[in-house]
């Protein structure tokens, strides 16, 4: 794997970046775009065009949106000589698992500092896959305790290895990680230019730690696209705000401008960033009826698999806008950030008792009632 970006469209437009920002090609990019014609017919809309960006196919061993950020984050960790990475998430964190899987490809060990979340089959799968990947797992009861326990683990690993782990923020959301989604917008621009889809009026994406949606927004504006981003909140309100979005937007623009002064220092386009708060439900990771109906409908009409924490809620927001005629005479793109790789073979026969004891409850307690995944 080359620690030098040469094949990503952002670098083609701003070649100075490759001399300032490390990159490793981990993903299978570009990901395809598909029209959801059967869904359009089922919904009875002839004047609305619906598309999906298949980031579920973004890479092996793990798809979804995380690999785009990890191409830059893990490249820096490797370039700076780190042997371990430490990151954060919920018990069933997709980000923590993806980090561990791709870190292993690069010869890095991974440590996941996790907090509890509602139980689901996906949580069980991700925990067993983390065990399979050799990820060191720790769970703390809340955010404050996680911060304290993380300091402890950083110190312990320094004593054991002589080196601190490389820290990766929750969701990989930092100026460096978000470069991956600035690049994603340039990738989309190339697909529009090649006639694979019209320029969308709205792009729907899940907003957790906000890195995906804000990185996309910056990339869209830098690429000269007019599309607005509908950021569907799937985490507590304290983690998602326009003020935070503007800060992340500016910090990433500054990073890229320093790397290549031709990259514009754009103002935050608040009018093109639409926060959608109505589909969060009662808690992070707790499925809603609207989300699970959206999961079912997309699966029935396209064969695509979503889940209830992120993509189901996001697609429910898109469907609500279709049904309310807010997308009349418009084109909308759903950015599928879910991983579609099947891990059933890897986890078959694994014993959850090999996990740390604090994770047993996810296998001994029932999953939440709305979990429609097979179990």
Image (cartoon, helix red, strand yellow):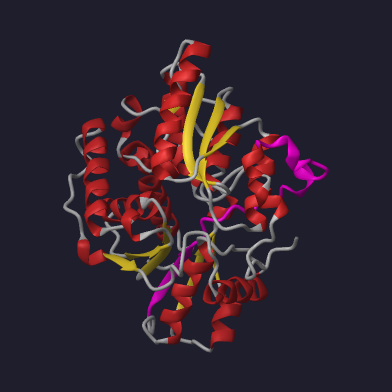
**Which residue is found at the position 21% from the left and 45% from the top?**
250
In the image, residue 48 sits, relative to residue 218, either above or below, namely below
Q: Is residue 267 visible?
A: yes
User: Which x, y percent locates residue 205?
Assistant: 43, 61
Nearest the viewer among 147 and 219 is 147
Q: Which residues are magenta?
A: 330-356
In the image, residue 66 sits, relative to residue 298, either above or below, namely above
**Which residue is found at the position 47% from the left and 67% from the top?**
314
Q: Is residue 3 visible?
A: no
Number of labelled discs?
A: 0
Q: Looking at the image, which residue sits at the far right?
A: 349
User: Which x, y percent locates residue 89?
Assistant: 49, 44
In the rendered image, the quadrant that contains the C terminus is bottom right
**Which residue is found at the position 54% from the left and 81% from the top?**
40
Q: In the image, 90: left or right of 185?
A: right
User: Which x, y percent locates residue 165?
Assistant: 46, 23
């Amino acid at each position: 794997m080359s620690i030098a970006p040469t094949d990503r469209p952002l670098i083609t437009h701003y070649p100075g970046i490759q001399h300032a920002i490390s990159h490793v090609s981990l993903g299978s990019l570009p990901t395809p775009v598909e029209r959801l014609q059967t869904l359009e017919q089922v919904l009875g809309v002839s004047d609305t065009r619906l598309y999906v960006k298949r980031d579920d196919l973004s890479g092996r061993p793990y798809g979804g949106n995380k690999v785009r950020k990890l191409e830059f984050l893990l490249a820096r960790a490797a370039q700076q000589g780190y042997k371990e990475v430490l990151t954060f998430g919920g018990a069933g964190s997709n980000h923590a698992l993806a980090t561990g899987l791709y870190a292993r490809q690069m010869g890095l060990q991974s440590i996941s500092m996790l907090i509890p979340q509602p139980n689901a089959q996906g949580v069980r799968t991700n925990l067993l896959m983390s065990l399979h990947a050799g990820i060191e797992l720790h769970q703390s009861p809340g955010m404050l305790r996680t911060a304290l326990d993380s300091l402890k683990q950083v110190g312990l690993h320094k004593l054991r290895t002589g080196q601190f782990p490389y820290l990766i923020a929750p969701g990989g959301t930092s100026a460096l990680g978000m470069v991956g989604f600035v690049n994603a917008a340039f990738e989309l621009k190339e697909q529009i230019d090649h006639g694979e889809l019209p320029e969308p009026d709205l792009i729907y994406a899940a907003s957790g730690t906000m890195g995906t949606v804000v990185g996309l927004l910056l990339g869209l504006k830098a690429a000269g696209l007019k599309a607005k981003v509908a950021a569907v909140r799937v985490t507590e309100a304290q983690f998602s705000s326009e003020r935070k979005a503007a800060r992340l937007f500016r910090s990433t623009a500054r990073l890229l401008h320093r790397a290549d002064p031709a990259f514009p220092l754009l103002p935050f386009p608040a009018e093109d960033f639409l926060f959608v708060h109505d589909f969060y439900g009662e808690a992070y990771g707790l499925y809603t009826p609207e989300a699970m109906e959206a999961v079912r409908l997309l699966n029935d009409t396209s064969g695509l698999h979503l889940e209830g924490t992120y993509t189901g809620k996001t697609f429910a927001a898109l469907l609500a806008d279709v049904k309310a005629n807010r997308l009349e005479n418009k084109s909308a793109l759903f950015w599928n950030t879910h991983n579609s790789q099947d891990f059933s073979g890897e986890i078959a026969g694994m014993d959850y008792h090999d996990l740390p004891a604090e994770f047993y409850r996810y296998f001994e307690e029932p999953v939440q009632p709305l979990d429609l995944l097979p179990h």
